[in-house]
Amino acid sequence: MSNSCPKCQQSNIVKSGIVKERQRFLCRDCNYYFTVKKLGKQIDDYYVTKALQLYLEGLSFREIERIIGVSHVTISSWIKKYNIKRPPHSEFHTSYKVFKQSELITFVQNEENIKGSGLIITEFGDKYMMIRWERFKK
């Protein structure tokens, strides 16, 4: 059952029949009838968080779309929804690479690949993404 009335926000609600195969409710405080809103195709918070992290690292909406498989329009709406502002990336540049687990192990074993840069490794399904940033040489 729904937690509160969409009109008056009170929680004095009772079931009141079924309309078009959806449960109908009545608010006893304001006599408002309503049905439960569908959640629609809700995307796991894990992917929302990953998209926001990638955006903060300097990736474009379309790059993020290719990596996590969520529309760039959706990603743009998350950026607006959570009011994410990117810090200026003037002194460093980011790059990213996607690995299978065995490739990642081989890459990390070579110290030259990880020396002198920041590194984040995050899981994406059956693969791992490495985000790396290096300061521009002065």
Image: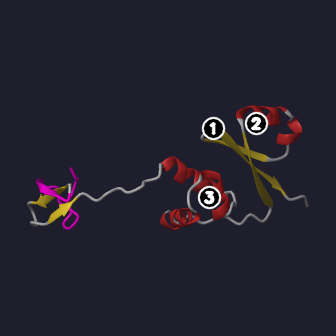
**Looking at the rendering, which quadrant does residue 99 occupy?**
top right
Number of residues whose C-alpha sits closer than 10 Å to that of mark 2, classed few (under 14), some (14–19) or many (20 or more): some
The residue labelled by disc 1 is 126
Q: Say the numbered circle drawn on residue 65.
A: 3
- Residue located at (83% from left, 56% from top): 135
The kind of residue tagged 1 is: Asp
**Looking at the rendering, which quadrant does residue 27 occupy?**
bottom left
The kind of residue tagged 3 is: Glu
Count of labels in the image: 3
Q: Residue 103's spot in the image, x, y percent?
A: 77, 35
- Residue located at (62% from left, 58% from top): 65
Colour scheme employed for the rendering of this structure = secondary structure
Please name which of the two marks, 2 or 3, marks the residue nearer to the observer.
3
Q: Residue 81's spot in the image, x, y percent?
A: 48, 65
The residue labelled by disc 2 is 104
The kind of residue tagged 2 is: Leu
User: Considering depth in this image, is 111 or 107 the residue closer to the camera?
Assistant: 107
Using residue 107 as the reference point, say whether residue 75 is left or right of it.
Answer: left
Q: Residue 70's spot in the image, x, y percent?
A: 56, 57
* Residue 132 forms part of the magenta stretch: no
- Residue located at (52% from left, 68% from top): 80
Number of residues whose C-alpha sits closer than 10 Å to that of mark 3, classed few (under 14), some (14–19) or many (20 or more): some
The magenta region covers 1-20
